[in-house]
Image: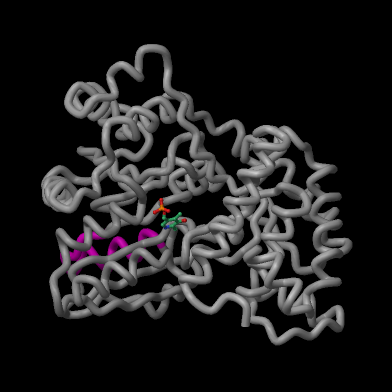
Amino acid sequence: MLVNSSVDEVKRREAALRVIKSTIKEKGRNGLYDLTGLSGGFPLVEGDIRLLETYAGSAIFEDAIQVVGRIHLGGDKILALNRTSSGILAAILALVKEGDEIVHYLPKHPAHPSIPRSAELVGASYREFDDINDFEVGENTSLVFITGSTMDHEIIDKNDFLKVIKISKSRNVPVFVDDASGARLRTVIYKQPRAMDMGADMAITSTDKLMDGPRGGLMAGKADIMDLVKSKAQQFGLEAQSPLVAGMVRAFENFSPEKILEALSKKHEVCNALKKDIKSVKETPTGVMLSSNDLKLELENRGITTRFSALDLSDTLAMLFLRKQNIITIPAVGMPGASPTIRIDLASQDAGRIGVDLIVDMFKETFSEFESIAADEKVCRAVLYA
Ligand SMILES: *Cc1c(COP(=O)(O)O)cnc(C)c1O
C-alpha cells in the first residue's frame, strides 16, 4: 500500500506544499488553480492592520463578529475559533464527561474525524447514524451532533434534521450542528433555515468554505451553553485571536450567495462533459466529485487492477492533478483524515478564472495519464512523495 498512516498523509501534504511553492516561484500565484473551495481569504480593509493587537483587536473585532455572526448563523452569542475542529473539541470538553455518550446523525458516513476523536479524548462512547429510522438517544447521551452537509457535500434532509431535534429535545439533550459547509449550502442552495432557527442549541461553520474567509470556525448558540463552551475554549487556547477574527468579520461583510448560485448553474455542464469519459464522476451541490471508492471501481471497469487501496489511488490522482496541471484538490493538501474524495468546486475563485471548458480538458487529460501509471508502485510513490 502507498498511504498507510497519518504520518504518510503528512508527508504527502508536505510534498504537495513543495510543488505549490515551486509553482508560485516559477509562474506566480496565477499559475496555480485552487479548486478546493477552501479559500483561506483574508479580505482586511484599510485601517484593520493597525488594530490587530491582543486587546485593541479583541475589543473591536470580537464585538463586530457578534453582529455579522448572528446574521449568518442566528443564536444569541457568537464564538470565533481557530478551526471548526477546535469548536467541536471545545463543546465536547464543556458538555461531555467520561462515560457519557455522544450520538451523531449525518446524511451519509463518514463524519468529520474531529467528532469521534474528541469523543475519544474525553473518554465518551460514540455512535453514528446515517439512517434516520435507526437514530436514537441513549440513557447516557449528553450531546447530539447533526452534520448539515458532509465533507463530500451530502446534504441532510430537512425533515430528518427536525426529527433528530425533536427526539433530542424530548430527552433534554443539547444538539450541536456541524454546519461547516452546510451553513451556506443548506441555506443558499436547498433553501433550508439556519440550524439555530430549526431548534439547534449550537451550530458551527468553517469560515473558508464557500466564502472568502480565513480558515477558522464560527460558532453560534444559546447564551448559557455558549458561556460554558467559551470558557473551555479559552482555557485550552482554542479561541481565534484578533487577526483571524478580523479576517472573518470582513469575509462575512462581503459574503454574497451569488457565486454559489452561479456554480450551481454550471455544474451540470461540467459533470455531463466528464461523464462521457469517466462514468463515476458525480455532481455535488456546487461542482463535481470522484470518490475514492468510485475511482477504484472506475479503474477496475477499465480492466486496470492494482493492489492499492481507494485512498492510495485518490491521493495519487490528486497529486497528479497538482504536478501536471497545478490544480489543487483536497486529497493532495488535506490534513490526515481529510476526505479522500477528489472534488472540484466551481464556486472557488480560481474556477471562475479558468472556465468550464478548460477544467473539463485538464481533468480528462490528467485522468488518462493516471490510468497509465496506476499499476506502477514506483511511479505512484514518486507522484505522492517526491
Ligand atoms: C471541513 C469540515 C470540518 C472541519 O473544519 P476545520 O476548519 O478543518 O477544522 C468539520 N466538519 C465538516 C462536516 C467539514 O466539512
Q: In the image, is residue 167 part of the stretch drawn in magenta? A: yes
Q: Quadrant of residue 137?
A: bottom left
Quarter of the rendered image showing ligand 1? bottom left
At a point 42% along the width and 24% down the height, the residue shown is: 253
Indicate the quadrant containing the N terminus: top left, top right, bottom left or bottom right. Answer: bottom right
Question: Horizontal placement of 119 versus 187: left or right?
Answer: left
At a point 27% along the width and 43% down the height, the residue shown is: 220
Question: Horizontal placement of 353 versus 221: left or right?
Answer: right
Q: Can you say whether 116 is above or below 75 in the image?
A: below
Say which of 110 and 82 sits in front. 82
Residue at the top extreme? 47
Q: How many marks?
A: 0
At a point 38% along the width and 43% down the height, the residue shown is: 216
At a point 58% along the width and 75% down the height, the residue shown is: 3
- Residue 294 point in image, percent of width and height: 70, 73
- Residue 127 point in image, percent of width and height: 33, 78
Give the magenta part as a residue range: 161-175
Question: Horizontal placement of 248 versus 10: left or right?
Answer: left
Res 264 visible: no
Indicate the quadrant containing the C terminus: top left, top right, bottom left or bottom right. Answer: bottom right
Question: Horizontal placement of 181 versus 244: left or right?
Answer: right
Q: Can you say whether 318 is above or below 256 in the image?
A: below
- Residue 29 point in image, percent of width and height: 65, 34
Say which of 257 and 310 sits in front. 310
Main secondary structure of the magenta stretch = helix
Q: In the image, is residue 303 part of the stretch drawn in magenta? A: no
- Residue 265 point in image, percent of width and height: 71, 41
